[in-house]
Structures are given as structure tokens and as C-alpha cells.
Image (spheres, coloured by chain):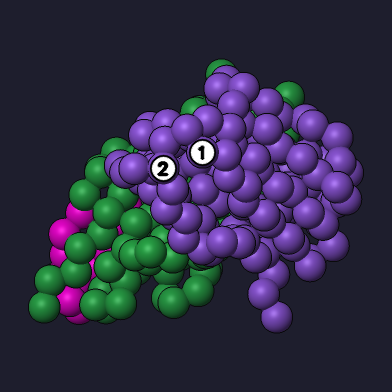
């Protein structure tokens, strides 16, 4: 069965320090993987997606993620956190076959300290 | 131009009432979705339509009934509202043709049942 696990429900970083949000997936096939961000009282916005073209994916607002098949991971990183990065982040997997669904992780709330 | 729009943005109503939420997308997508986000930010897929045909129908009370008059619109009707229906409901759309397709989300409808 396909699934996605976000290992941390909350992450706190200081402004200007690196951000690491962890995501592991389980899929029988080569999936597509996405990261979405949700700012307070807003909808979900796509940060980046992996579609097998390149394992290191660059997204908006300085975020990037690396697909590691051997570790079944797709961790989201940013070199330097800004206050505006404080939000909820969702890792999403879409298996290559068998379902029309996008499977969401439980989310990681990022807090950025001044 | 708003890609995926929902109305209303806020909905406050009494238990037992019937209400509808409307969703429209102008992206030319063939597939639309309804998600429910609870107070812990968990996103749960409810329904999905592809070209007006129901393709995902998760275990939700039959008080919830989706309707897709055309592939640009997907409405959600809720009968006999209960306290537990209070949540944020998100509409989303995508193409279904490949698993690499991105889902685009509306701004959400915040439903409060009193």
C-alpha cells in the first residue's frame, strides 16, 4: 500500500538558519512526489514536485528537495529560513498506478523564531 | 484570474441545516476533488470527479453529496449538518492523464456548525 510519513509534526528554527522537513514514502512503483505549503487561513500552494526528471528539485522561495530512492525519502530543505516561511507543509505522493488519489502526509508545522 | 475558486469562503450555520459549497476551476482540468481538513490540519480526500464521472468516493456519510454539472464545476451539498462537520473544505483540480500532474487548490471554505 502506498503511504507517506512526515516524521516531525512540528519544527522550530531560528531565522537565518537551515530548514529540514522530513518525508518518507512507501510505494510499489516510482511515484511522483510533491511538497505543498499552507500559510495560516490560506489554501495549499505547490512548492515543488519530483517527476523522475532530476533527483534534486528546486522550488519556489528557495526551497529544494532531493529524491532518494534507496532511502525512500523526499526531504525538503532551505538554506536560510525567513519569518514568512512559517506555515504548514505537506508531503504528497501520487503512485504511478492503481489509484487516482494524491496521498497526503499529516503535515509539519514550521515555526521560525526571530 | 483565480484558478480554483470556492464560494462561500465562510459558512456559519445551525445543526440540522442543509448547505452547499460551490467550486469552479478555469484551468481546463478534467478532474476535481473535495478534501476535508480538520482542526489538526489532516487532509482527507472525500470525492473526485473526472469529466463529470465519480471516480473517488471515500467513506463519508451519505449526508454529503457531490455534484458535477460540468468538468469545470464541482459542488458539495451537505444535509442535516452536524457539529462534527465543522472543518475547512478544499476543492482542487488537476489533469488525470499522468501521475505527474499537479493539483491546484482553492482557498477553502471554513464551515462552522453551531
Residue A91 lies, in percent from the top left, at 46, 47
User: Is residue A98 visible in this depiction of the protein?
Assistant: yes
Chain A colour in the picture: green
Q: What segment carries the magenta color?
A: A11-22
Is B39 included in the stretch rendered in magenta?
no
Residue B27 lies, in percent from the top left, at 79, 66
Residue B24 lies, in percent from the top left, at 73, 60
Q: Residue at x 68, y 56 (%)?
A: B23
Q: Which residue is mark 2?
A: B14
Viewer-proximal residue among B65 and B104: B65
Location of residue B103 (image quadrant) = bottom right
In-image side of B106 versus A37 (left or right): right
Q: Which residue is mark 1?
A: B17
Label 1 resides on the chain identified as B
Is residue A5 shown above or below A57? above
User: Callout 1: 10 Å neighbours few (<14), some, many (20+)?
Assistant: few
Q: Which chain is purple?
A: B
Is residue B58 shown above or below B31? above
Q: Quadrant of the C terminus of chain B?
A: top left
Viewer-proximal residue among B99 and B93: B93
Amino acid at each position: 500500500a502506498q503511504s507517506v510519513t512526515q516524521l516531525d509534526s512540528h519544527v522550530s528554527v531560528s531565522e537565518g538558519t537551515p530548514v529540514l522537513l522530513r518525508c518518507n514514502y512507501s510505494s510499489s512503483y516510482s511515484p511522483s512526489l510533491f511538497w505543498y505549503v499552507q500559510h495560516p487561513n490560506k489554501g495549499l500552494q505547490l512548492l515543488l514536485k519530483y517527476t523522475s526528471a532530476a533527483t534534486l528539485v528546486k522550488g519556489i522561495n528557495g526551497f529544494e528537495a532531493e529524491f532518494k530512492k534507496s532511502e525512500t525519502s523526499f526531504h525538503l530543505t532551505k538554506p536560510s529560513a525567513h519569518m514568512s516561511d512559517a506555515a504548514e507543509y505537506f508531503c504528497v505522493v501520487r503512485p504511478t498506478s492503481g489509484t487516482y488519489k494524491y496521498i497526503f502526509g499529516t503535515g509539519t508545522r514550521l515555526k521560525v523564531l526571530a | 484570474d483565480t484558478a480554483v475558486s470556492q464560494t462561500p469562503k465562510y459558512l456559519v450555520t445551525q445543526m440540522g441545516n442543509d448547505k452547499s459549497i460551490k467550486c469552479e476551476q478555469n484551468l481546463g482540468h478534467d478532474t476535481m476533488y473535495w478534501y476535508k481538513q480538520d482542526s489538526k490540519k489532516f487532509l482527507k480526500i472525500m470525492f473526485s470527479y473526472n469529466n463529470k464521472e465519480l471516480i473517488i468516493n471515500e467513506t463519508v456519510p451519505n449526508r454529503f453529496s457531490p455534484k458535477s454539472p460540468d468538468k469545470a464545476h464541482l459542488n458539495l451539498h451537505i444535509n442535516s449538518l452536524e457539529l462534527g462537520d465543522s472543518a475547512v473544505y478544499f476543492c482542487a483540480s488537476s489533469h488525470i492523464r499522468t501521475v505527474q500532474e499537479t493539483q491546484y487548490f482553492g482557498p477553502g471554505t471554513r464551515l462552522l456548525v453551531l
